[in-house]
Image (spheres, rainbow, N blue to C red):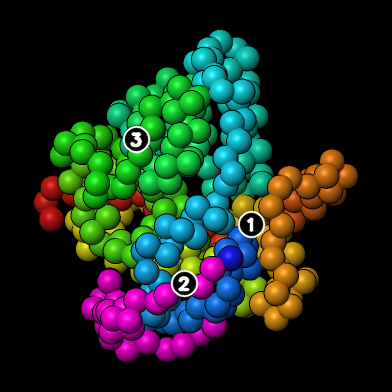
Amino acid sequence: MFDSVADANAIQRPCPICGGTTFKPLFALRDNRTGAFRQRFQTVRCLRCDLVGLRPLPREVDLDVGYQLGYGPYPCPSGGAVRPKRSGARKRLTDRLRLYWHFIDGNATVDRVKLDGRILDVGANQGDNVEYLLGQGHDVVGLEPNPRACAVAKSRGLPVVCGTLESASFEPNSFDTVILSQVVEHLPDPVRALDRTYELLRPHGRVVVFTPNVYSVWQTCFGKEWAHWHVPYHVYLYGAAQLRALLTGSGFKITRLTTVTPTYWLTMSQRLWRHNSQSTGWTLPAGAPSHTKLRLDLIGRLLAAPLLRVVDLMRLGDCLIAIGTKDLDV
């Protein structure tokens, strides 16, 4: 654990979406998911556009250290070798069953979206999405800023570049699809990242965004124990209106905006709430649960699924899914 030093000028930094400078304090929260940071971080709401974020912002150098301490280690799940592209009836059955389960369980996964052309997966981590998309026959490249995760992806033979949207040397108009799955909430400058995404896309290309919904019914239920505050790693948190404003501000035309609640996300919030983590100092443990817990968890997921899917249809689920198209008429 270490003490982060806040950016002394960040409290004066305007809202990245609307330029507002007046914020309402919400919760002073501790890092209850990784335990890498000692102090509390103040979440605030912009009084002009309702974007939620941290003020003051932590320094990016401290966040980099936090990612090194709090994220990983990164085991290689496929034994160091990328799985070959599958084909035939077995592949079709496996893909269909996977998709059915993800819809039942509410998983916020890339198979929920039809993907075409050359794909860039931003925030690729150790390359699981890249491996899956390669197995589906896609032309895909991963981009990952964490060198430890990137090294694991490369050891698996996956095409993952170490860097950020701003630092990677991709040419403009290089991709048909850019995936930002659980990425925008981590970005201290989301507008610059979305502008760069727009530049990288070919005409009529699409950006696919998955990000926590800070105005979900589950955030209301769990309050400060909602798992996806995830301070200080989640620098900004969006609702549907704020995500729409972010995308349209960079020139994208919104073609889809929905929500989904992964049941394991709900389970994380339940565990933090049960342990009253913000008051007791309890931290969500790393590692996989036992087989018994997995069986009980599976039963709970199936029982909870009907309610969660109704909430999702009301656009009040825990995760926002947005698709924006590069609109050349803007």
Task: Name the amino acid, label 2.
Answer: Ser
Whichever of labels 2 and 1 marks the residue nearer the N terminus, that label is 2
Q: Residue at x 37, y 87 (%)?
A: 23
User: What predominant SS class does the magenta segment belong to?
Assistant: loop
Instruction: Decide: is 175 above or below 4.
Output: above
Name the residue carrying label 2: 4
Packing grade of label 2 (10 A; few <14, some 14-19, many >=20) is: many
Q: Which stretch did the figure color magenta? A: 2-28
Name the residue carrying label 1: 265
238, 41: nearer the viewer: 41
Whichever of labels 3 and 1 marks the residue nearer the N terminus, that label is 3
Instruction: Decide: is 92 above or below 237.
Output: above
Task: Inspect the magenta stretch and tell me whether residue 50 lies in it.
Answer: no
Name the residue carrying label 3: 161
Q: Residue at x 46, y 88 (%)?
A: 25
Q: What quarter of the picture does the N terminus occupy?
A: bottom right
**Cα separation between marks 3 and 2:** 28 Å
Q: Residue at x 70, y 81 (%)?
A: 279
